[in-house]
Image (cartoon, helix red, strand yellow):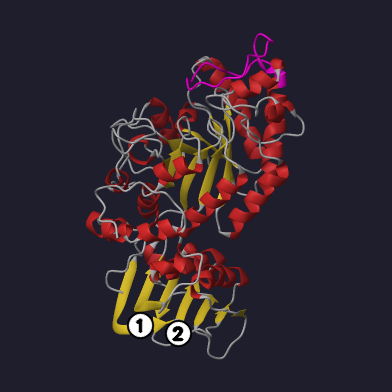
């Protein structure tokens, strides 16, 4: 296993020199988890052409997926050992152990990367299908490892989101945060307020049809993600970034007049009428219906760039809305500007600043004991250009090369050792209009973020990473991903 091209890099790798496992044509997978077994078999069948039956019992299986206790040393590796796994590769068999279904699934993703890259082809390829011998013991550094897609500035259908979920799960990212509402578009159907979909969802940046997810579509996405151990986190941004909602319902405006649709990219000009009781009826209804669609623990309420809301009104609004989230059984998540508002127990603030020191809102959040989700704009904002020549993207937080996205330590970003729960890479879509645009800005930087969030700091090294990342290029090509050929990477 020396030099294995696995991303994120596992916490511990113990090679067995001279040992190689070769998948035989009549291979059998025995699995304690039908889902994990089928995930492995489904990934291997197209390129190998093998039948790969998945069974509960077999006397001599070629690959075993076991639920149970991996090596107890996992507890020393990670604060989230339940998501860890162990892989043992011998000449005649492979065993993957996970304490939980999630851990077993993560082990399967690593095993797939141990096979030759041709295994990612959708058509039958020539073998042999070999895996280097040895042992891997691995678990995540952070429990929350995510990406965000802004579907409000430009709308993307469920198929695009499912494709993105699949790629997140390959690299052991376990959260997809969806920015579902903004000035340019409202993207989730709400039965109690139907014009949010028909009026608020009817456009996007630059004009065009926009779109809105039906409840059935959103439920299908949530189910697909859950099968891959990815949690969908919905965001309803408030009290600013609300023009789409205001255009649908005049009563949510302070003057009672609905503005027209907005297709530009400016921010900070809209606000809900925070002194009207109908506003809180609206918020309560929306949050209740969105909560019913998302079984995950988090509900994101935005809270950033509310420049048209006075400080007094902002604090009063958040003082009423945050308890609604808690009453629905969810954990409050918001951009770090909510740190100035009264704290709900367990609240998470998402830090997107790029200043050397925390701003006033983040300092307030840290002083109150809030947990922190790190999304520093100058490291992990995927809408930033790679360099001045990148055909799309923005650069207000600077250019972000793959190395820039990789070469930092979440544990030392903020002073005072705050309670950091994880890392999330947002992709805002002011300039992103197609799936090809998503690919260009997301890959290869998403893989860098995945390693930052998963791997222990001591195991990470840029020289090693750029070599392992280079081996992902052929896999992305086989999967139809148009990645940015960063010149710092020695692409295979």
In this view of the protein, can residue 345 be seen by the observer?
A: no
**Circles 2 and 1: CB distance less than 8 Å?**
no
SS assignment at label 2: loop
Q: Quadrant of residue 50?
A: bottom right
Residue bearing mark 1: 20
The residue furthest left is: 463
Q: Picture coordinates of residue 138 (x, y %)?
A: 40, 66
94 versus 279 height, above or below: below
Of residue 182 and residue 332, the one placed in the foreground of this image is 182
- Image position of 413 (left or right of 94): left
Residue found at the very far bottom of the displayed protein: 59
Q: Is residue 239 left or right of residue 290?
A: left
- What is the chief secondary structure element of the magenta stretch? loop
Q: Give the residue at x 53% y 90%.
A: 60
Q: Is residue 118 above or below residue 55?
A: above
- Secondary structure beneath label 1: strand
Q: Position of residue 287 (x, y in %)?
A: 67, 35
User: Dividing the picture into quarters, in which one does residue 243 lie?
Assistant: top right
Q: Which residue is farthest top?
A: 255
**Nearer to me, 398 or 435:** 435
Q: Could you say which disc has been placed on residue 93 in the image?
A: 2
Q: Quadrant of the C terminus?
A: bottom left
Asked if 135 appears above or below 479 in the picture, the reply is: below
Relative side of 296 to 461, left or right: right
User: Percent position (x, y) of residue 85?
Assistant: 45, 69
Q: Which residues are magenta?
A: 252-278
Tell me which numbered mark, 2 or 1, is placed earlier along the sequence.
Answer: 1
On whether residue 251 falls in the magenta region, the answer is no
Whole-percent x and y of residue 147?
Answer: 47, 45
């Amino acid at each position: 296993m020396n030099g294995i091209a696995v991303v994120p890099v596992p916490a511990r790798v113990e090679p067995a020199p001279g040992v190689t496992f070769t998948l035989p044509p009549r291979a059998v997978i025995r699995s304690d988890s039908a889902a994990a077994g089928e995930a492995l078999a489904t990934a291997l069948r197209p390129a190998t052409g093998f039948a790969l039956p998945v069974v509960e019992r077999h006397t001599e299986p070629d690959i075993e997926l076991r639920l149970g206790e991996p090596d107890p040393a996992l507890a020393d590796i990670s604060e989230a050992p339940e998501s860890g796994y162990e892989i043992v590769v011998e000449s005649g068999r492979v065993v993957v152990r996970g304490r939980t279904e999630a851990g077993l699934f993560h082990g399967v993703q690593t095993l797939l990367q141990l096979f030759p890259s041709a295994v990612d082809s959708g058509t039958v390829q020539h073998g042999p299908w070999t895996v280097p011998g040895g042992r891997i013991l691995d678990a995540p550094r952070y429990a929350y490892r995510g990406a965000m897609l802004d579907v409000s500035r430009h709308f993307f259908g469920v198929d695009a989101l499912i494709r993105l979920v699949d790629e997140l799960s390959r690299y052991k990212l376990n959260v997809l945060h969806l920015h579902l509402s903004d000035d340019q578009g409202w993207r989730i159907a709400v039965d109690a307020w139907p014009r949010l979909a028909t009026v608020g969802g009817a456009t996007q940046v630059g004009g065009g049809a926009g779109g809105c997810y039906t409840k059935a579509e959103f439920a299908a996405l949530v189910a697909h993600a859950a099968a891959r151990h990815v949690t969908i986190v919905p965001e309803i941004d408030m009290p600013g970034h609300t023009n789409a909602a205001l255009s649908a319902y005049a009563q949510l405006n302070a003057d009672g007049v609905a503005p027209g649709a907005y297709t530009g990219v400016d921010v900070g000009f809209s606000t809900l009428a925070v002194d009207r009781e109908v506003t809180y009826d609206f918020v309560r209804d929306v949050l209740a219906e969105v909560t019913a669609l998302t079984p995950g623990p988090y509900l994101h309420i935005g809270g950033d760039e509310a420049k048209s809301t006075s400080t007094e009104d902002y604090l009063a609004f958040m003082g009423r809305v945050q308890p609604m989230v808690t009453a629905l059984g969810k954990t409050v998540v918001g951009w770090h500007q909510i740190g100035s508002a009264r704290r709900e127990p367990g609240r998470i603030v998402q830090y997107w600043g790029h200043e050397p020191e925390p701003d006033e809102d983040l300092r307030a959040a840290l002083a109150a004991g809030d947990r922190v989700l790190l999304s520093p704009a100058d490291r992990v904002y995927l809408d930033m250009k790679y360099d001045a020549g990148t055909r799309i993207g923005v650069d207000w937080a600077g250019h972000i090369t793959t190395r820039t996205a990789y070469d930092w330590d979440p544990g030392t970003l903020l002073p005072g050792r705050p309670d950091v729960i994880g890392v999330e890479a947002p992709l805002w879509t002011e300039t992103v209009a197609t799936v090809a645009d998503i690919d260009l800005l997301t890959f290869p930087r998403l893989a860098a973020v995945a390693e930052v969030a998963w791997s222990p700091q001591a195991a990470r090294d840029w020289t090693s990473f750029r070599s392992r990342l280079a081996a992902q290029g052929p896999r992305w090509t086989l999967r139809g991903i148009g990645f940015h050929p960063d010149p710092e990477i020695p692409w295979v």
